[in-house]
Amino acid sequence: MRIKYIWLLVAACLLVSCDKFKNKDPETTPAVEKPAFDADSAFAFVKAQTDFGPRTPGSEAHSSCATYLKEQLAAFCDTVIVQPFTTTTYDGKKWSAQNIIGSFAPEKSKRVLLGAHWDSRPMADHDPDPAKRTQPIDGANDGASGVGVLLEVARQLQQKNPAIGVDIIFFDMEDYGTPSSENIPGDWWCLGAQYWTNHLHRPDYHADFGILLDMVGGENPTFYHEGFSSYYAQHIVSKVWGTAYRLGYGDYFINNGANPITDDHYYVIRNTGIRMIDIIHQDNKTGTGFGYVWHTTQDNISHIRKESLAAVGTTVLAVIYDEKE
Ligand code: AHN
Ligand code: ZN
C-alpha cells in the first residue's frame, strides 16, 4: 500500500518537473509577451500613402498625404502639432514643407520619440534604366513603410496606454538629397529633421530616447547596428535588438555592426542630444548599401511584406510597453 503511494508521488513529481521543463522551452514560452500589432492594418496605412502617388515636395500628392497623416494622428493621439517650414534644396529650389507630430500623454516627463520620414524621393537616381532616373518614386519602403508602422503603433497605443509618454514625428524633406551623379557639399538630406531639431515643437521638449524607422517593410530586410546608433546609443540598440530576438525576430535584427547612415536620427542626436537609433534595412551585397529597390521606380507597394512590418512594429510596441514610468 505505502509503496504504491510512493510510486504515485514519484510519478506526480516527474509529471510536474516535465511540465516545468516544457515551460522553459523558448519556442513555447516567449520571454516577452507579444503585443498586438496588426500587420494588415499597417500594410493598409502604407498603401494609403502610396495611393496618393509619389509624395514629392510641391506635388498634390504631398499635400493630400499631409492632410491624411494629420487626420490619422488626430484620431489616435492626444495632441497633434503641425510644424510648417520653408527650406531650400541642393538645386536652389525653395519649398513649403511640414513636420507632423502626434503625442500621447504630453504631460508625462518620461518619453520615447518615434520617427519616420513621410516624403518620397523626387528622382529614382539608382534605377537600372537610365531613362527612369529622373522620375519620382512611390517610396513604399523608403518613407511609407516607417510611417505605416508608426500609424499602427499609434492605433495600438490608443487602445492600450503605455506607462510613459510617446511622441510620433513624421519628418518631411528627408529624401531630396543630392543625386548620386552630383557632388555638392552641404547637409542636403534630412531637411525636416534639421528644421525640427533647431525649432522644437515645444521649446522644452525632451525624450529619454528615440527610434527612427527607415525602410522597414521590404523583402527579407536585414537590420544591423547602424553606425551612428551604435556609437551614440548602444544601450538603446541592445534594448531593441534584445527585444526583437526574444520575440523571435532574430533573422531580421542582426547583431552585427554596419556603416553609419546620414539619416534623420543623426541630426536628432547632433542637435538635441536625444539618443535616437535607426532601424534601417542595410545590405552590403547590393552595391548601394541598402535594399535592391532603393531609390528606384521599383520601390512600390508590390515589394512591401507584411511579415517585415510585423517584425518591426511588434518589436517597437514591446519596447514601449516594457518602459516603466
Ligand atoms: C545617404 O545615403 C547619405 N543617406 C540616406 C538616407 C536615406 C535616404 N534614407 C532613406 N533614403
Ligand atoms: Zn531615400
Image (spheres, rainbow, N blue to C red):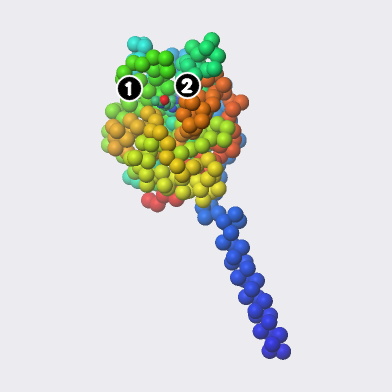
Kindly identify the residue that appears in the image at 42 percent across and 40 percent down.
257
**Residue 114 vs residue 23: left or right?**
left
Under circle 2, the secondary element is loop
| Visible residue check, residue 151 | no
Q: Quadrant of ligand 1?
A: top left
The picture quadrant where one finds residue 6 is bottom right
Which numbered dot is residue 120? Answer: 2
Q: Which mark is residue 187?
A: 1
Q: Residues within 10 Å of mark 2 (few under 14, many from 20)?
A: many
On screen, residue 25 above or below 61: below
Q: Nearer the viewer, residue 216 or 289?
A: 289
- Beta carbon of the mark 2 residue lies under 8 A of ligand 2: yes
Q: Is residue 26 above or below residue 236?
A: below
Which amino acid type is shown beneath numbered disc 2? Ser
Q: Residue at x 39, y 20 (%)?
A: 177
N-terminal label among 2 and 1:
2
Question: Where is residue 43 drawn, in percent x and y?
Answer: 58, 32
User: Residue 99 lies in what quarter of the image?
Assistant: top left
Task: Please report the residue visible at 42 percent of the width from the left and 14 percent of the height from the top.
Answer: 181
| The N terminus lies in quadrant | bottom right
Tell me the residue at 36%/11% (across/down).
91
Q: Position of residue 178 (x, y in %)?
A: 39, 17
Label 1 crowd (10 A; few <14 / some 14-19 / many >=20): few
Nearer-the-camera pick, 96 or 125: 125
Q: CA distance from mark 2 to mark 1?
A: 18 Å
Which numbered mark, 2 or 1, is in the foreground of this view? Answer: 1
- Vertical position of residue 80 compared to residue 9: above or below: above
Residue 4, visible in the rendered structure = yes
Q: Position of residue 231 (x, y in %)?
A: 34, 40
